[in-house]
Image (cartoon, grey):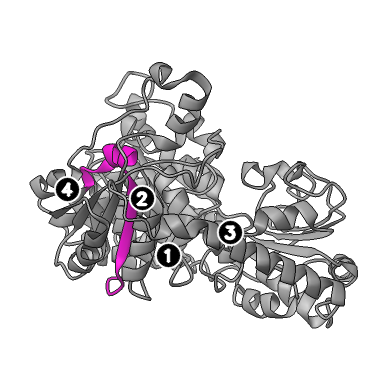
Amino acid sequence: MSFAHAGKLVARALRNEGVEVVFTLCGGHVMSIYDGCLDEGIRVVDVRHEQTAAFAADAWSRLTGRPGVAILTAGPGVTNAVTGIANAYRAQSPMVVIGGQGPRSLAGKGALQEMDVLSVIRPITKGQVSISDPARIPEIVSWAFRTAMSGVPGPVYLEMPLDLLFAPWEDGGSRLPAPYPGRPAMPGDESRVAAAAELLRAAERPVVLIGSQVRWSPHWQAAREFAEKVGAPVYVSGMARGLLPPRWARSRKAALAEADVALVFGTPLDFRLGYGGSPVWNEQCRLIQVDLDPAEPGRNRDAAVAIPGDSGTVMMQLLALGDLGAGRPARRAWLERLEAEEEKRLARMQPDLTSEAMPVNPLRLCAEIDRALPEDAILIGDGGDFVATAANVVRVRRYPAGWMDPGPLGTLGIGMGFAMAARLAHPDVPVVLLLGDGTAGLNLMEVEAAVRQNLPFVVVVGNDAGWTQIRRGQVEMFGAERAPATALSYTRYERVAEALGGHGIWVERPEEIGPALRQALAADRLTVINVKMGGSDFRAGAISV
């Protein structure tokens, strides 16, 4: 009979669930788990701020379809990661977070980093457990993975006190449960699907919106056939970006204002969709809403047909019912009108896309990025105005997770953690992070962690010397002389990267962008391209609240 500390049992339970990598910032409360990870062949990736560990675990989930894991030390180690956990919760991204805690024998005495973390974590996780018995570690770890992936995905938190993790455990004495097999199909009620099909057949101006939940459908590929056969403009957002060719990218606003039927798959009618009301939506539009959460349809706008279910499976059910009205003459005319709207919007963008201005026009920068990117590149957007502009110009190359951004919480700072996870999940794929200069100030120290652990990727900083998404409206409302806290300087972020062991390139002219990107993509380590960027009126009037 041999004994080991329970940190090794944690690692064994993680490996049983297919975990290949964990993200962490070191802490004495959790270091026994690292010891177990070495035995189990789990890579331990350390970062310079716990927030980045949570962001990376979130991204790992989006990239692989399996929950990422963050391991955090007690107290402030966990609270430092709260923003990353909250971001995953709002984005409906599954992850398992393990947090340390002071010894149970010292509870309430004021042990180092002791605090009631569960009360802090509860509103932003699907489940929370403080483990008290080492023998139950495999059972509860298995529960955490099942809970994170079932229904509406999201984060789960496991608290592991210091004395639990160092408790002796009989090696081989605990049963490992069967690992989570993956998400099952969740079809919609047949009568409701039939009612939705009838509405679609009768519609003259239907519109289809596909959101992030399609990422978690076992039948997400059905979206491609559905888009071909529905005979309606199909708009993708969030984790659905890259799923379909970018035929419909610029006319969504016009489509929603005129649509008589809207079919919404797996995305809430939140601020991104005008809360489902006018003036963004046609008041007479009838809504068909498909969601993993049965309580979501009807929030902000009544649903004519509400279908609890997963997006891809419900699409398959609709396709099985045959004709959805694609051949109706009125619908063909509707599509032609929207195609004309797409062309008009692109034509309005052309002067900016080809601008020779210095500092570089934001749309010209994005056009040059689009031209230089390899066809298999993973794109990550972390910023405000620059990234919102890029989302209109830079094509998403792959699916799933060909484009990753914070999601509906709008969290800045996700970029370095997301990029590190992307490099680990797809080591042979180019990874390009689009970073606003405001955002660059949040987590750029992670360059050191990425370089040290041989995780190369490309960072493009759109540097317009300001928090422009906020500053634009601030100046319009109060005047430039009453606009504090939003102006920055043209900081040389590429020199920061060089000091931390990476490469750096400073770009001032539009013709320098393509060569700089090609040089960075061919480099053997993380490279920051810092582009001195000017302004444009492309996003004038954009609301940032």
Kind of residue indicated by mark 2: Asn
Q: Which residue is mark 2?
A: 361
Kind of residue indicated by mark 1: Leu
Instruction: Identify the element where label 1 is drawn.
Output: helix
Badge 4 vs badge 1, beta-carbon distance below 8 Å: no
406 or 170, which is in the foreground?
406
Q: Residues within 10 Å of mark 3 (few under 14, many from 20)?
A: few
Q: Which comes sooner in the sequence, label 4 or label 2?
A: 2
Q: Which residue is mark 4?
A: 494
Kind of residue indicated by mark 4: Glu
The location of residue 382, given as percent across then percent down, is 39, 48
Disc 4/disc 1 C-alpha distance (Å)? 28 Å
Disc 4/disc 3 C-alpha distance (Å)? 34 Å
Q: Residues within 10 Å of mark 4 (few under 14, many from 20)?
A: many
Q: Nearer the viewer, mark 4 or mark 3?
A: 3
282 or 317, which is in the foreground?
282
Instruction: Identify the element where label 4 is drawn.
Output: helix
Disc 1/disc 3 C-alpha distance (Å)? 32 Å
Q: Which residue is mark 1?
A: 63
Q: Which residue is mark 3?
A: 345
